[in-house]
Amino acid sequence: YIPFYNPLGLISAAIEGEGSNISIRNSSITGAFPRGIYNYGTTTIENTVLEGTKNSEWVLNTFALLIEGVNSSVSSSTFKNNTIGIKIMSGNTRVENNIFQENGTPIFLQAGDSSPVFLNNSAENNSSNGIVVDGSSIIGDVIWQSNLPFLVGDKGVAGSLTLKEGTVIKFSGNFIVSGRLNTEGTSENPVVFTSGSDDEFGGDTNNNGTSTLPAKGDWQQIKFQSSATSSL
């Protein structure tokens, strides 16, 4: 159990690694401020509770866990009442069998060249019940796979983006493809592009029940530029 409070913001995180291999199992990190775990190396989190890392002023820089490294994994853990549960900056992190409750953002994804795998995670009563994707263009060879929806504003695909079967993209702007977009949906488990207000696919993402319904104009377009090569 690690309570941590740093009112002056002089320390980056309660637990920080500079390229280290960090493994945390069967633990609880509660009330960390301004950040919980921050590692540039390989991080393994298992059966751990990360709770109460909150700051209303540093919204994008207050998180229970930040991962910036390869071969990291987060499993069978609970993220509750954090500004951001997990922030993934790069790599091929595997996130599975976790519970996200009452967070501002359960998962924030820096999308440029990240190919994390999300499996069997649940998100309830968060401000947004999904994976919030930043606005940077995809420049690498990226694969998205998740049972939670990806929440996207404007997005450029200059590299390659593959969407595995069952992937749901809820977006509000333009999806501009100058590289390659591949969808691998099936008739039983399609890839879906839809509105953030569409509860039929990906569940109640905006956490407001039936207060809002999908409508024309919720998102703009998927545009393939002349250089694009895609398979849908």
Image (tube, rainbow, N blue to C red):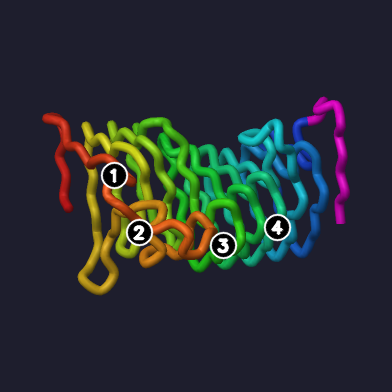
Tag 3 secondary structure: strand
Q: Mark 1 highlights which residue?
A: 217
Mark 3 or 2 closer to N-term? 3
Give the SS element for disc 2. loop
Q: Please tell me how crowded label 1 is: few (under 14), some (14-19), or many (20+) other residues with Cα within 10 Å.
A: few
Q: For the image shown, how many numbered marks are present on the structure? A: 4
> Alpha carbon of mark 4 to alpha carbon of mark 3: how far?
10 Å
Q: Dot 3 corresponds to which residue? A: 123
Q: Can you give x and y, in whole percent of width and height, for residue 166 in the image?
A: 33, 64
Do the CB atoms of the residues marked 2 and 4 lie less than 8 Å apart? no
Question: Mark 4 sits on what residue?
Answer: 80
Kindly identify the residue that appears in the image at 59 percent across and 43 percent down.
Answer: 87
Q: Which numbered disc, 4 or 1, marks the residue that appears first in the sequence?
A: 4
Front: mark 4 or 1: 1
Prevailing SS of the magenta stretch: loop
What amino acid does circle 4 point to?
Answer: Lys
Q: CA distance from mark 4 to mark 1?
A: 33 Å
User: Mark 1 is on which residue type?
Assistant: Gly
Q: In terms of secondary structure, where does tag 4 sit?
A: strand
Between marks 3 and 1, how big is the CA–CA gap? 26 Å
Which mark is nearer the camera, 3 or 2?
3
